[in-house]
Amino acid sequence: MSEKKKDFREKYNEVYKIVAMIPEGKIVTYGQLAWMVGGITARQAGYAMKTAPPGLPAHRVVNSLGKLSPEYVFGGQDAQRALLEKEGITFTAAGNICVKKHLWGNE
């Protein structure tokens, strides 16, 4: 395995460890997640989430605008929204997550 590939695998594992710690009722953005890991971009954090192992609360990772994931993720936006609402996450009238209210570490 190349060093670069090994480095990204290690970074992805760090992403997964952090995502596993996100408390119920909180969200993180891809950018925040990238900052917490260090050495990756928000886009790379998103790529890591595409290959996340089962059981992670991946529905709690969102973009900085609070938009729900594309239809092909989580069984669709309605499914992701239902998971988040069950945890107490609230949404704006436009259907975006109230990011400032629910951002992990923003207490």
Image (spheres, rainbow, N blue to C red):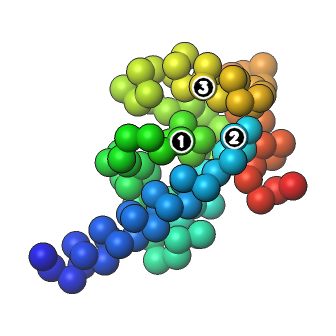
Tell me the number on the disc at residue 57: 1
- Where residue 3 appears, as percent x and y from the top left, is 21, 83
> Label 1's element?
loop
User: Which residue is painted at 73% across and 53% down in the image?
Assistant: 104
Label 1: few (<14), some (14–19) or many (≥20) C-alpha neighbours in 10 Å:
some
Which amino acid type is marked by label 1?
Answer: Pro
User: Which residue is painted at 78% across and 43% down in the image?
Assistant: 102
> Label 2's element?
loop
Q: CA distance from mark 2 to mark 3?
A: 10 Å
Instruction: Give the image quarter of residue 83.
Output: top right
- Where residue 67 appears, as percent x and y from the top left, is 60, 34
> Is residue 19 positioned above or below 77 on the image?
below
Viewer-proximal residue, 14 or 97? 14
> Is residue 58 positioned above or below 32 on the image?
above
Residue position for label 2? 24
User: Which residue is painted at 73% across and 38% down in the image?
Assistant: 25
Which amino acid type is marked by label 3?
Answer: Leu
Report whether residue 31 is seen: no
Instruction: Give the image quarter of residue 63.
Output: top right
Tell me the number on the disc at residue 83: 3
Contact, CB < 8 Å: mark 2 with mark 1? yes
> Is residue 24 positioned above or below 9 on the image?
above
Q: Give the farthest residue toward the bottom.
A: 3
Report whether residue 67 is seen: yes
Q: Earlier in the sequence, mark 3 or mark 1?
A: 1
Q: Earlier in the sequence, mark 2 or mark 3?
A: 2
> Label 3's element?
helix
Tell me the quadrant of the picture where the C terminus can be found.
Answer: bottom right
In the image: residue 67, left or right of residue 46: right
In the image: residue 30, left or right of residue 5: right
- Where residue 6 appears, as percent x and y from the top left, is 25, 76
Label 2: few (<14), some (14–19) or many (≥20) C-alpha neighbours in 10 Å:
some
